[in-house]
Image (cartoon, coloured by chain):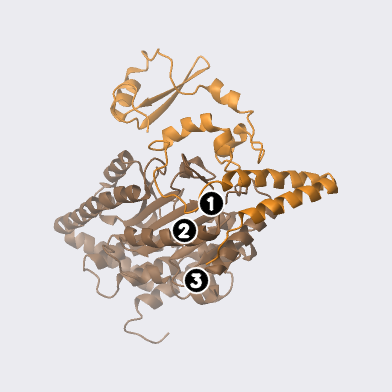
Chain colours: A orange, B brown
Amino acid sequence: MKKCRRCSKPATLHITEIRKGEVQQLHLCEICAQKYLAQGNADEDEPSSSATVEDLEAADELACPHCGITFRQFRSQGRLGCPHDYEVFETELNQLLENIHDGIQHCGKVPQRTGEAHQDHFRLIKLRNELQVAVKEEAYEKAAALRDEIQQIESRLKPQTTI
Amino acid sequence: MDLDSLAQHCGEWLRGTGPDSDIVMSSRIRLARNLAEFPFPNRADTAAKSEIETLISERMKALSQRQKLNYIRVSDLNALDRQFLVERQLISRELSEGSGPRGVGISDEENISVMINEEDHVRMQVIHSGFALDDCWAEINRVDDLLEHEISFAFDDRLGYLTACPTNVGTGIRVSVMLHLPGLVLTKDIQKVFQALQKLRLAVRGLYGEGSQAMGDFYQISNQVTLGRSEEDLIKTIKEVIPSILKYERRARETLLLENREGLHDQIARAFGILSSAQTITTEETLHLLSSVRMGVNLGLIDELQIPAINELLILTQPAHLQKVRKKPLESAERNIARASLLRQRLTAREHETN
């Protein structure tokens, strides 16, 4: 969770100021925020350290190679397209996660399985997308090759034991 | 699972009387999970959603010896049946109004429900009556382990369980407690409670969760943070704040009794009177009056009714439930009459066995 920029208490208010077309983001605790708002914000001259509108707009064109979603689409709908997006939009999301949560390192429950399957899983999303396109374009040979690869990976990921 | 047969009663879990159930209606924990190899539901096409649904529902079936989950294809249900499940808190409004292949697995007691293709691929929840977060956590942790044994969930070492919305990433947990706070509403102290909760990063919502109003003085308190803290720690924060709210509410009720016992008793008695004899009544008025009656039972001012019966009425007087019992759709005016009839029947049933 972000610290107030005036004192060191946790910031609970996140103020976005737009002045002369410039956007500033301020993170303040309740008391400092009250003071700031009461003063009529005459003395906030130092540039903010968080993302400006330009930063976010530059990221807008970024797209996930697996599911195709762009950062702009994420910003407008509030939801990501696939698990891989967390990697693709890492820098931009870190900012957001810091504001929402109490830190950006998971320290809770961990699944029983291990993670080597991750690469395979991301590849599967991409392959499925490509298969869809190939079928639409009637490139059936390509589609068949893609389907075979998908089946190969799926059988590799299948659990060894069942309960 | 036959929905028609469910319509006469509410779920087992709501009829129980857990700890502190005078004020705590229910405790609920929800976990969000996603399959690692598919796009999230908002981005997945019908074929993918169908595959996801098949994958997960098959796993549920395979688990039936350890945990029976009755599977319902929500996409096959009509609007009335979907609304019915929403009213019973077995599915969310989002799942009901969503599109494409989606479903839910529900335990016989209705306290476990696992949704497929809502905002995330899997949204599982466990509900218990009263203040019972530890029981909820033990149970849902078990269900999560059972499902995950057969499925690969999207997970990152740094960010935890990956979810469609960054507000859920990490533990993917939503811990909630539903409280009945008519005392604090009457003494106008409820705002102070909101402010205190806000400081702890806890959200307060109405009876049906996100975006709903606090009708009938029922408030749902839940965590907002899901990353950077463990599940046990997040549960602990809510567990530790609830006793002070309970004390505050009980003190407010005592104050009201001391300062104006007759006035309060009158309000409660009138509420019971209207519910027992009205010929037509809206959902809104019902919730409002049942809230008074519920407080009345807690304060010992009403003998004729028990808390589980009132909790049950809160569900059975809802629109889809009334129509399921009659086995046909009803217009608003007809529903208001049916509701009044049900209330008269249930509130005076003790002495009169005849219909």
Tell whether label 1 touches label 2 (CB within 8 Å): no
Subunit that carries the residue with mark 3: B
Give the residue at mark 2: B144
Tell whether label 2 touches label 3 (CB within 8 Å): no
Give the residue at mark 1: B153
* Residue B244, x across and y down, in percent: 22, 50
Q: Which mark is residue B68?
A: 3
Q: Which mark is residue B9?
A: none
Marks 1 and 3, Cα distance to the nearest angstrom?
Answer: 21 Å
* Quadrant showing the N terminus of chain A: top left
Q: Where A32 sits versus B313, above or below?
A: above
Q: Are marks 3 and 2 on the same chain?
A: yes
Residue type at mark 3: give it.
Lys
Whether residue B294 can be seen here: yes
Query: Which quadrant of the structure image shows residue B311?
Result: bottom left
Classed neighbour count for the residue bearing mark 1: other residues with Cα under 10 Å, few (<14), some (14–19), many (≥20): many
Outermost residue, left side: B258
Marks 3 and 2, Cα distance to the nearest angstrom?
Answer: 14 Å
Q: Are marks 2 and 1 on the same chain?
A: yes
Q: Earlier in the sequence, mark 2 or mark 1?
A: 2
